[in-house]
């Protein structure tokens, strides 16, 4: 928005008169005040785009006015006028948030140039704000991260709490679950929006080059270092650094990373000068870092430094109910990016997609949908459009362990397990009861045969039947 309304505060009548006359002729709406208190009253009852304040005024001086104005209107453009030959007051004003200063005496061309410069800066600032809003909207936590299942609702709650903070986050999950997408969503919903989001894959860069990529290097630091280079930490200053596949970082580099996280400063390879960095760290891995700590292949102190807020992404097979939503999302994406006609998915195709295990998770599903949308001649996708999924056409049966694990996870999700002290016994009893009942039904109550099938002593079986409250049936 262009500058329209300007407040001028100066105890010199001639300065106020000259500025008001000149700016009014150019179409600006101008209000004037002869001291700080009058300026404060005008500010509180009118909306101004800019204030031009003399630094020396009776009552409230220009620096105090500057602080009060910006406390209520951080977006207000303030120019400080000073007759001091020293730069001390001008520097103080800039530190307190003034847009610029105007030394007295000045000519009107200087004023016009300064206001024009401020107007352009204001327009750029508004464009930046609009871009920030667009980015924030694009990376809304529930816009690109799709799902209504209980695991996803739990994830949204965690992300909603952690995004506005500056806490270090460790994202875990299988390949293809969307770890970088979650990292970007955290960044773009944080106060660091508008600052850099820098990603680096620790597994994709040779170990001898990874240190230079992270911390930068000085000219001549090694063969081929023909010029100074800033590393990812410097590039991410003020923003977020995403360390993907952190579990593949070499041990010797883990020690240097830990020191950077503790000291918040880096030293370029081949250099001696320390450089302060302000960076939020989000790390991700598809490995079990606790197991790597036990194996001594990952530093325990670094693990705890990274694992401030753990975020675990569920595999797609544990949230099959989200697949129809994901299908719709990817079909819309195919329409926009591949310029294909609007597609939909038949119930039979959705059923096939929901029965597949998706070892590549959401990434694999996206590829399957985009490929089918591009190649299918029909507006409605059918199972025939997913030939790669039809080998065991109807997906192989889930193992008993998978089924039990899935049901157990659903049962325990709403429970605070930290309040229990007999979970193992409780779960075992619930699993034993149906098992014994089924075996006794199959053996028509023959306990001897049932004990033989179960691989336990007959007396043990009798005791279990009593404890679990099951009817004993016939003895032989």
Image: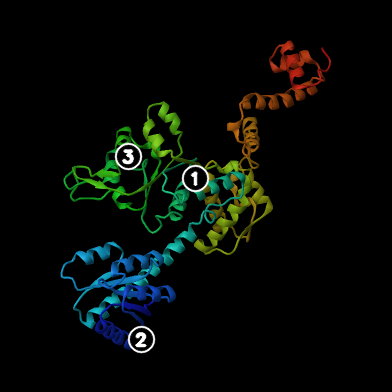
Rounded to the nearest whole Å, what is the CA distance between mark 2 and mark 3? 55 Å
* Nearer the observer, 106 or 324: 106
Q: Which residue is drawn at 19% across and 42% down?
A: 270
* Nearer the observer, 358 or 147: 147
Is 303 rendered above or below residue 452?
A: below
Q: Mark 1 points at which residue?
A: 176
Q: Which residue lies furthest to the front in this view?
A: 59
Q: Do the residues labelled 1 and 2 touch (CB within 8 Å)?
A: no
* Nearer the observer, 47 or 42: 42
Rounded to the nearest whole Å, what is the CA distance between mark 1 and mark 2? 58 Å
Name the disc covering residue 27, or none.
Answer: 2
Is 460 rendered above or below residue 11?
A: above
Residue 54 x/y as whole percent = 27, 74
Q: Which residue is drawn at 27% across and 61% down?
A: 95
- Quadrant occupied by the N terminus: bottom left
Residue 21 x/y as whole percent = 30, 87
Disc 2 secondary structure class: loop
Res. 419 in view: yes
Q: Nearer the viewer, mark 2 or mark 3?
A: 2
Residue 364 x/y as whole percent = 52, 47
Name the disc covering residue 262, or none.
Answer: 3
Residue 67 appears left or right of 463: left
Residue 457 x/y as whole percent = 71, 11
The first of marks 2 and 3 along the sequence is 2
């Amino acid at each position: 928005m262009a500058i329209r309304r300007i407040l001028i505060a100066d105890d010199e009548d001639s300065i106020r008169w000259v500025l008001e006359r000149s700016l009014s002729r150019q179409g600006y709406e101008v209000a004037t005040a002869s001291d700080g208190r009058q300026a404060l009253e005008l500010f509180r009852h009118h909306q101004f785009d800019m204030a031009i304040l003399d630094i020396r005024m009776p009552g409230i001086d220009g620096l105090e006015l500057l602080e009060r104005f910006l406390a209520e209107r951080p977006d207000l453009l303030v120019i400080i006028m000073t007759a001091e030959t020293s730069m001390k007051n001008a520097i103080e004003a800039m530190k307190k948030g003034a847009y610029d200063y105007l030394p007295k005496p000045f000519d009107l061309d200087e004023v016009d140039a300064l206001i024009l410069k401020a107007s352009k800066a204001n327009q750029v600032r508004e464009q930046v704000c609009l871009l920030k809003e667009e980015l924030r909207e694009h990376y809304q936590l529930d816009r690109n991260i799709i799902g209504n299942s209980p695991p996803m609702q739990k994830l949204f709650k965690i992300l909603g709490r952690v995004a506005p903070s500056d806490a270090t986050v460790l994202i875990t999950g299988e390949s293809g679950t969307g770890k970088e997408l979650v990292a970007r969503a955290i960044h773009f919903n944080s106060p660091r929006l508008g600052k850099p989001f820098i990603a680096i894959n620790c597994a994709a860069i040779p170990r001898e080059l990874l240190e230079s990529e992270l911390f930068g290097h000085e000219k001549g630091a090694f063969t081929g270092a023909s010029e100074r280079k800033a590393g990812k930490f410097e590039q991410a200053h003020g923003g977020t650094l995403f360390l993907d596949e952190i579990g593949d970082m070499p041990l010797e580099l883990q020690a240097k990373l830990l020191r950077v996280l503790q000291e918040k400063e880096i030293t370029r390879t081949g250099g001696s000068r320390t450089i302060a960095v302000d960076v939020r760290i989000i790390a991700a891995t598809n490995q079990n870092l606790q197991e790597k700590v036990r194996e001594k292949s990952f530093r325990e102190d670094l693990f705890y430094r990274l694992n401030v807020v753990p975020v675990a992404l569920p595999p797609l097979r544990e949230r099959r109910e989200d697949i129809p939503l994901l299908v719709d999302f990817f079909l819309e994406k195919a329409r926009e990016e591949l310029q294909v006609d609007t597609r939909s998915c038949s119930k039979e195709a959705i059923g096939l997609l929901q029965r597949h295990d998706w070892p590549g998770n959401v990434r694999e599903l996206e590829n399957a949908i985009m490929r089918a949308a591009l190649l299918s001649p029909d507006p409605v996708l059918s199972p025939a459009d997913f030939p790669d999924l039809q080998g065991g056409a109807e997906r192989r049966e889930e193992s008993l362990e998978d089924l039990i694990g899935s049901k157990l996870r659903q049962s325990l999700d709403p429970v605070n397990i930290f309040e229990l002290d007999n979970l193992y016994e409780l779960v075992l009893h619930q699993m034993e009861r149906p098992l014994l009942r089924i075996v006794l039904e199959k053996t028509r109550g023959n306990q001897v045969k049932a004990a033989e099938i179960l691989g336990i002593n007959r007396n043990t079986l009798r005791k279990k039947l009593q404890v679990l409250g099951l009817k004993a049936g016939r003895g032989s």
